[in-house]
Amino acid sequence: MTQLSSKLFALGLIAASFSSFSANAENTNDYFLGLDLGAVIGQQMETYDSEFGSNKQDLAPSLAFGVRGGTIVNNTHKFSIGYDYRGISYDNNPYEADINTVFGKYDYIVPISKNLGWTIGGKLGYEMLSDNDGDYIKELNGIVVGAQTGLNYRFHDWSVGTELSYLHHTGEFEVNNEYGSASTKLDDETLIMANVEYHF
């Protein structure tokens, strides 16, 4: 799948998830804008070489932040589209790269009390990697899929929350030549995020 078709596929699924609910006039919608701030807790770069086998190298902890907007339908179904950013670097290496991701999310809200809700859902997006050297890191661009769960507390027009998410990367850089094959990819990662949202 080419990079262009991967982007179109991801954006098409995101748009379809929103349009499925907009067609029903009886739905009550609560619109929101939000900010996310957190950290990647445990990420590795996985490499494979046909001669030496596979190896995983720890990446340094990284801050992550993002913006989101969306709607909550009937106080139960939460749809978001957004953007997030985080960096990656090796613990003992000055090499750094940026990860920019556009995504769509769905969360099902389970009420715990009048103001407190438990959320559980999934995420689909497209990530773009870049660095100062412009080398193979861009080959790791690709679709990401994930799952998340969290708690949100609502008061008046504002809500605050926390979320634990798991993200799988599909991008992979592969080389095949007369000496064998080699590949590099980001291993699955876990993120913990705090968020604040304004509802209108």
Image: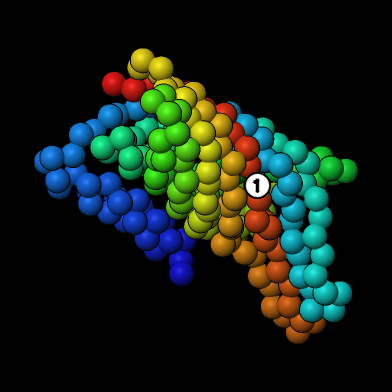
Task: Answer above or below: position of 51 versus 26.
Answer: below
Q: Is residue 80 left or right of residue 119?
A: left
Q: Quadrant of residue 170?
A: bottom right
The percent position of residue 37, horizontal first and vertical second, equals 58, 28
Camera-side residue: 153 or 83?
Answer: 153
Q: Which quadrant of the figure has residue 116?
A: top left
Q: Residue furthest bottom?
A: 178
**Residue at left offset 73%, top offset 46%:** 42
Quadrant (top left/top right/bottom left/bottom right) for the C terminus: top left
Q: Nearer the viewer, residue 96 or 68?
A: 68
SS of the residue under disc 1: strand
Res 148 seen here? yes
Q: Is residue 117 left or right of residue 175?
A: left
On screen, residue 69 above or below 106: above
Q: Residue at x 43, y 29 (%)?
A: 113
What amino acid is found at the position of numbered circle 1 in the picture? Thr
| Residue at position x 59%, y 41% in the image | 164
Q: Is residue 125 visible?
A: no
**Where is residue 126 shown, x and y percent of the image?**
48, 52
Q: Residue at x 75, y 38 (%)?
A: 61
In the rendered image, residue 157, in percent from the top left (x then y), is placed at 35, 17
Residue bearing the label numbered 1: 190
